Image (tube, grey):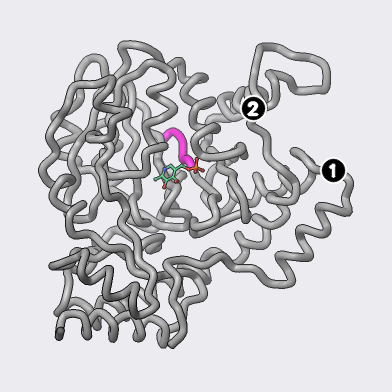
Amino acid sequence: MSKISLSKCFVNTEVEEAALRAIRSGQYILGKESQEFEKELAAHTGTTQCVLGSSWTMIVYLLHQLQGIGPGDEIIVPSHTAFPTMEPLIHLGARPVFVDIDDTYCMDLDQVEAAITPRTVGIIPVYIYGHPVDVDRLLGMVAKHRLWVIEDCAQAQGAKYKGRTVGSMGHFGAFSFFPSKNLTVLGDGGCITTNHTQMADRLRMLRNHGRQGKYDHEFPGYNVRFNEINAAIGRVMLKHLDGFNENRRKIAAHYNQRLSVLVTTPPERPWAKHVYHMYVVRANNRDALQKHLKENGVETGIHYPVPNHLQPAILNQFKKVSLPKTEEVVKDILSLPIHGEMSIAAADQVCDAIAASYKK
Ligand SMILES: Cc1ncc(COP(=O)(O)O)c(C=O)c1O
């Protein structure tokens, strides 16, 4: 019986050769590979601009700084997300206003509308597990209240909403290239996509010590730059992204077909093209199922076991809120193995193990 991992990074000779090409180029930071990667990412997303940075967390921190976010500002976020979604805004003194989720696991837009106050400055919808929100409805609210939107696409690279690629619809899109993501650079990295040329130009300067040339610093900045080896690798990965996403969708369809009688399978709205960064089910006796799968060589995960509004880092600073749906799903969600190269045979092995667990 072969072991089945939760996710897997793609590496082939093309990827290795790209890394070697960057090594041999003699230029290691923000060079030609990074410039080309930015252009290719913008083209793939459907924006005019893309700005690479050392991670989602750091490039969003710089973006928030350029947006002028500070104390007194409220930003609406789901609690059901990776903790980094709200870290940058907290560092700048703003307050995360948590909203509950709907059955897609994304933020419930009814609750978003109800959470808007005169202090609200923006909304960060998270396309959790690879499924977008109803963007048209969200943008309607945003226009009415003059807010900004940063699409958190960290888990949704290549996903679509009514045929439009995520990261092209809000004021900004934010992506992560962490190794488990649908598009990785085999290391840390992230980017912002946008059509706001001026903001992109400022962001490029802010990530590189506030300068354009070598010794002309217009304002104090940071080092949130991008490495050439990662950019060269990312360019190869990007060529494979759509194909790998199609494979993820094929595996998800197979899981849906085999598992819907045993567990609650993930929904996909008619307007969404889900890219299944995670394939998450809700399962009775989740912990026993997870243990059984582990004993049978199937790695699983829980994304995420403790909701962010109940994390000590939040409770230490902000008033406790109650989000019943979020608090309920964390008790029975389970992420099953899925990745761009996964075979149907491997998916069948996972399904067989789940079926055997419920027959016990
Ligand atoms: C939804 C979401 N937002 C933000 C991040 C942060 O990304 P990074 O690790 O590149 O800072 C992640 C990754 O963990 C994520 O899954």
Circle 1 residues within 10 Å: few <14, some 14–19, many ≥20: some
Asked whether mark 1 and ligand 1 are closer than 8 Å, the reply comes as: no
Q: Is residue 143 visible?
A: no
| Left or right position of 349 against 11 | left
| Left or right position of 36 against 104 | right
Q: How many marks?
A: 2
Report how far apart the C-alphas of labels 1 and 2 lie in the structure: 18 Å
Asked whether mark 2 and ligand 1 are closer than 8 Å, the reply comes as: no
Which quadrant of the figure shows ligand 1?
Answer: top left
Check the image and report above or below for 192 versus 161.
Answer: above
Residue 26 x, y percent position in the rendering: 89, 46
User: Image point 31% across, 75% down: which residue?
Assistant: 293
User: Image point 79% across, 14% down: which residue?
Assistant: 216
Disc 1 element: loop
In the picture, residue 49 is in which quadrant? top right
- The residue at which mark 1 appears reads as 27
Residue range (magenta): 170-174
Residue 306 x, y percent position in the rendering: 26, 44
Disc 2 element: loop
User: Which of the numbered marks, if any, corresponds to residue 207?
Assistant: 2
What is the chief secondary structure element of the magenta stretch? Answer: strand
Check the image and report above or below for 352 versus 337.
Answer: below
Residue 305 x, y percent position in the rendering: 27, 50
Q: 92 or 330, which lies in front?
A: 330
Kind of residue at disc 2: Arg
Q: 62 or 187, which lies in front?
A: 187
Q: Can residue 25 be seen in this view?
A: yes
Quadrant of the rendering where the N terminus is positioned: bottom left
- Dot 1 or dot 2, earlier in sequence: 1
Quadrant of the rendering where the C terminus is positioned: bottom left
Residue 154 x, y percent position in the rendering: 45, 47
